[in-house]
Amino acid sequence: MKLIAIMSIIFCMISVSFSQTIDFQNPVANSDNVFSLLSNPAGLGTNRGFQMMYANGYDENDFTKIYTFVFNAEHFGFAYQQNKEGGIDFSRYSLGTGWKLNRLLKMGFSYSWNSMGNLADGLSMGLLFRPLKSISLGFTGNFLNDPKKNNPDYQAGISFRPFGNRTTISADAFFSDEINSDYFKNVEWRLNLETEPLDGVLLKGTYDEDYIGIGLGLAFKFGLMGSFNSFNSDNNLERGSAYIQTSSQYFRSFADVPKPRNVHFVLRGSVIEQNRGWGIFASRKLTIYQFGKIIEKLQNDENVSGIVLEIDGLSAGYAKIQELTGILYNFKGSGKEVIVYAEYLNTRQYLLAAEANKIFLHPAGHLNLTGIQFTSMFVKGTLDKLGIVAELEHIKEYKTASDMFTRDSMSHYQREVINSFADQFYADILDEISLKRNINKDSLKVLINNAPYLAEEAKDLGLIDEYFYRDELKSYFDENENSNNLISYSSYNLLKPYEYDWEVKPNEKIAIVFATGMIMSGENSNEFYIGQTMGDNTIAGAIKTARENSNIKAIILRIDSGGGVAFASEVIWREVALTTSGENKKLVIVSMSDVAASGGYFIASPADEIFANPATTTGSIGIYSGKVNLKGLFEKLGIKFQHIKRGENAGMNSYTRGYTEKERERMIHTMESGYDRFVSRVAEGRDMTIEEVNEIGRGRIWTGKQGVEKGIVDKLGGLFDAIEAAEQKAGIQEDEEYSILMLPKYGFVWPLGSSDFVMDSKILAQLPEEMQQLIYYGYKFKSFENEPYLYLMPYDLIIE
């Protein structure tokens, strides 16, 4: 209703008076082009970018003084028409707008006024309904605002395309009666045929009781010119018009021979899963899905021969790097070239760059291929000096989350796990780089041990192919390919092809639910310095929405979370379980990003199938709980507390004292119950025994590759592999068109309403990474102070 109200306020038009202005005889059901404003304003609901058209009328003797100018921008249009023939000085002005009401229906409104004041004009409206790509229905009503002066005129039409988008057959009916509004007494019909037998060659023919019309047009890349002629029953030229049109979207052209080109795309900053919210204050970072669709678009464009991927401060976990690499691998598989350019490359960035056919570095840049380092922080010594005691307990030996606060070095169990991660990551890095750069593994190890390298050294060692300045990129292609062959992605994206098919947005058949951040109770949010959180209400609601949508055939749960609150994890788990085995059962496939561990794995366990990247961190089937006892710190500061309580265990979670033995007993009992619940949920979801889950559980984290071996992950693959599996399992045909429903939905982001402003602040960014981690854990503890126990990863892996 809001949309209709807004459109009603915006004044627009569509009424064509045959005697006063040029009649282009455009079918009402096939008006989604530059003629929309003069035929059916609902056609402005199809975004054609920017279009301009100028037309000049003529008769059998000469050009007349009848002119038309039309300008359309996005969903709005303006037209100016003038007639200075035979002593007449007549001008008409028109404004219009059109919008989508849903995936099949568009509505438009228009308003026109004229300089003479006594001719038919006023408010009009139009509808376009396209249930199929081959059928379109149109309707317009003119002179709606002043029925006393001019009874409304109506036009209804149908267009269909039996042989695709090159041929359109239309029939229109005109209903008009100025005397008694008996519209069906005098109905006029018009038939129309439009065809494009060759690229850019346009033919048009119309027929009604009074006239036969013939038109010819020629399309160039960004323009179109043509004429339309109307002949009377004596086969004499009654009137005609010549027109020229420009467009920001390029046409099929009879003279165009497109040159293959390389597209320059900058991969900068963080790569995330989903942007939360919209508006000028919202964070607009590149997502994995967006990158995949961009590369797919370039892959399918026959005018694109390759991409130049500039890596500029790329920040992503190793699992996301593997997904980006897989996307480039598929692009190369189509026979197109990938070139990477960078000023600087570290190990994980180089892992992505190695997928390219060629790697170029800035002459003053360097290659920091030094390997990987896993860092664990221990702050017990600091806490001891402050008089703080971390009273934390964990269930099972690998759930070592508390070690950071209770130990001053790695335990045997933590060291065992991190060594297994380091071994796999390093082996994978060696495998990938040696294969793609054709370097012997032993030689590669030596190169890594002697890094970093200057650009010149890296080239001599075969780690890169060339080095030159950024402004010399174009020169490289001028010398090696066709001239003017390199185009930026932003410029390429502006060069949109004119969409000839009638736009019928297909049904949403797959939903992707992005479950990212620390799991908390309530709604998704951005917490100070913790970053994005996953609210149980938000994610459970999104899963329920997808389950109850009758069009959705499969749900992909995309997880990037190390867990969090156990109760909130249970709420989300319940919705996943209801979806895979409840009344409205639907396919659920989990796609794991960098992390899907502890609570993140808990919510994944009921899924029908689980995908993970080789470097994904998963597992961590375990539990821990506790509090920080600040009594010693308060004493150092001279702060004292006195308590009056009723109930022996009152104040159990107070920071001013430690646990009593009885309180600790009860806490451990609660934790053991929570661990048993976790194990049983996994056993049920993965069709394993309690003993089998216990064997691979015990709080231990696994890589995605190890997860497949242990049976807690089904297949290795990224988000697009999960989408492909969903298509196959849900029975969606390979050539079937459908759209994807992205959940959760977010609204407008207000200034200072998001902690992105805090998280990205320059002050915090200047702190050492270790200090940032310390602050992060402080806020983490504060967030969990009232929770009985947590399904949370044993530690965050800092990989350098």
Image: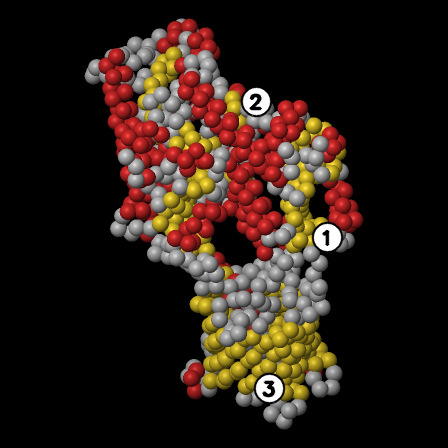
Local packing at callout 3 (Cα closer than 10 Å; few below 14, some 14-19, many 20+) is: many
Q: First in sequence, mark 2 or 1: give its number.
A: 1
Q: Is mark 1 on a helix, strand or loop?
A: loop
Numbered tag placed on residue 485 in the rendering: 1
**Residue at screen point 39% across, 32% down:** 619
Query: In the rendered image, which quarter contains the N terminus?
Result: bottom left
Please name the residue shown 58% across and 77% down the image.
194
Residue at 56 percent across and 75 percent down: it is 167
Look at 32% across and 12% down and name the residue there.
658
Answer with mark 1 or mark 3, whichever residue precedes in sequence. Answer: 3
Image quadrant in which the C terminus is located: top right
Give residue 777's mark.
Answer: none
| Viewer can see residue 24 | no
Q: Rate crowding at label 1 as few (under 14), some (14 to 19) or many (20 or more) other CA atoms within 10 Å.
A: some
Q: Residue 767 carries which label?
A: 2
Which labelled disc corresponds to residue 212? 3
Q: For marks 1 and 3, give the CA distance.
A: 47 Å
Quadrant of the rendered image containing residue 697? top left
x then y, percent, for residue 592: 44, 39
Residue 645 versus residue 68: which sits nearer the camera? Answer: 645
State the SS at label 3.
strand
Of residues 320 and 238, the one nearer the viewer is: 320
Q: Which amino acid does label 3 sit on?
A: Ile
Q: Is 602 located above or below residue 93 in the figure? A: above
Q: Which amino acid does label 1 sit on?
A: Asn
